[in-house]
Image: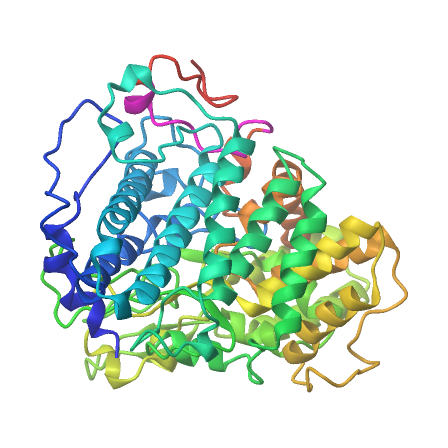
Amino acid sequence: MKKFIYYIITLACICSVSSCSLDEEVYTEADKTTYMKNASEAQYVLLGVYRDMVQANLYGYNLSCLLPIPSDLAKCEGSTTNGFRQVPANAYTPAQADIQNTWQSLYGAVYDANSFIEMLQLRINEFPEKDRSLATIYMAEARGLRALYYFELVRWFGNIALITNTQQSYQHPSTYTQAKPEDVYKFIEEDLLYAVDNLPYAKDDASRSDNRFRLSKGAAMGLLAKVYATWAGQPVNDESKWEKAAQIAGELINSGKHQLLSDYEQLWKNTCNGVWDANESLIEVSFYAPAITGSSLLDPCGRIGKWNGVALSGKRSNKGNWKVSCTFLRDWYKRQEDKRWALSFADYIYAEDKETGKDGIKTPVNLNFTFEQAITSDEELSNSGMKDNDIKKLREARYKDFDNKCCPAKWDTEKYVEANNALLSTDYSNINWYILRYADVLLLYAEALNEWKQGPTTEAYTALNMVRRRGFGKDVQTPNANVDRSGLDYKTFQQAVRDERAYELAYEGHRRQDLVRWGIYYETIQNTYYDMLDWCGQTPHYICFEFTQKGKHELLPIPQRDLDLMTSFKQNPGWGK
């Protein structure tokens, strides 16, 4: 099903440079005139640009499992900053290897996209006539991918170098200058508008023989809506982009080419088994490896479900290093009965039966209470007449297991992955990663309309309520007074959308960046800590509270190695010189 990604690696690597960091190394580029003589050869090289997505430094680990952790929804296991915990604790420095590697790999991906675009521009007029329309689609895919890679660079690092062709990559580092973020966004916008104009909708695609996990018109439109919403928020704050976000998202929604799946849980059954459904999946990273070799070049697999799934001990192992925020789950549960709640977290782990040696035995993290029972018992404690200190002690006893053991459950390998994880090692999985879902676009549309019009419109309510209805197990097209939001002003609707993004997209890598663009990242971290402390009466395992600084952690630092080479660059605020 996804084997094409594996089989194109060798051929793609012939025609692209494997690494391109902003440094002083010199690379020998393949001769662009000796390959890509037709659309078939062009596709092989293009798939190499797609393959950049699966790198551990990108969506295989860093951009999916590591960098997005510290927020009000999640934290890392443990109570120290040892080892890998430095990044989830916001305790890293500009010399952190994970930061350097993400920066380098994103620029390497940009280089590969630039190289393909240049090769195709050079060769397209020599293609057989029947191949030229297909080549235009491939060009749109490459520009859409380049836009995605630059979007990650600008929203994580802010003040970056804008490299628009391969020759710029060979300049001496001292010649690079920092582009204004708005100029990077304009470049992204140009690429995505080209992609929108030249890509077919996934459902209408009669040109590509296999368009699974490939960019489509809907994917480009949805990504552009997200780009505009980010551009409109902090730190750039160009509020004129709310109108554009609403317009492009509205065009996608009104096209009728995409829709929500009727069953929320089906999303996780699909992505855990490599099933692509273009109705809701707009951009999805496909991981597939027929064997685990241990080579990053040959193993296009990631850590989805291993690092951010339900903990599993024994011969098969899931680290389960993501831990959910109990106060977030408490607040979500108390609002209304939402079917997504129980599907999004696990108050259990999978353990090995010591007597039989069998793996995968479902074991509750608290033998006396489920998390739901612990929450519902709070009211009994409050009305018991006990002293406040005694209530806190009881709560601490009940919640200490939940606080540092509950994991996200969307990528529950034992529940969803078929064939007993036959192709999984102790560290890697074949589980896919959603970058952009249609539900995300609906919520962006509702948000953008509210911000643009300074109040919710009928269309904004419809988009928000469709997502909510599906979450509550209702028909998305049928109004439901028990579920639908109505009668809200600008501020209350704004908060309703923000809450819904947390519920719908929990643990999918969006929350930290949402808090940053809303300008409330630091405040949310602080409030979450004190809420945890007040609720369960103990010091929570929420280490990022100690290190997160306002005006600093909204952006990652420019990696120290590159900053030393690029002498005209200035470090991001709060990170020193």
Q: Is residue 385 magenta?
A: no
Image position of 222 with respect to 87: above or below: below
| Quarter containing the C terminus | top left
| Quarter containing the N terminus | bottom left
Q: Residue 89, position in %: x, y?
A: 45, 39
| Scheme of colours in the image | rainbow
Left or right of 356? Residue 573 is: right
Q: Main secondary structure of the magenta part?
A: loop
Residue 387 visible: no
Q: Nearer the viewer, residue 135 or 373?
A: 135
Q: What residue is at 16 percent from the left and 43 percent from the top?
A: 17
Q: What residue is at 56 percent from the left and 56 percent from the top?
A: 325
Residue 523 quadrant = top right
**Highlighted magenta segment, given as a residue range:** 550-563
Residue 496 quadrant = bottom right
Q: Exactly how many numbered labels are in the figure?
A: 0
Q: Is residue 562 magenta?
A: yes
Q: Nearer the viewer, residue 111 or 349?
A: 111
Q: What residue is at 66 percent from the left and 43 percent from the top?
A: 518
Q: Residue 181, position in %: x, y?
A: 52, 31
Residue 108 visible: yes
Image position of 60 with respect to 228: above or below: below
Q: Residue 88, position in %: x, y?
A: 43, 43
Left or right of 428? Residue 372 is: right
Q: Nearer the viewer, residue 573 or 437?
A: 437
Q: What residue is at 30 percent from the left and 60 percent from the top?
A: 303
Q: Residue 29, position in %: x, y?
A: 13, 38
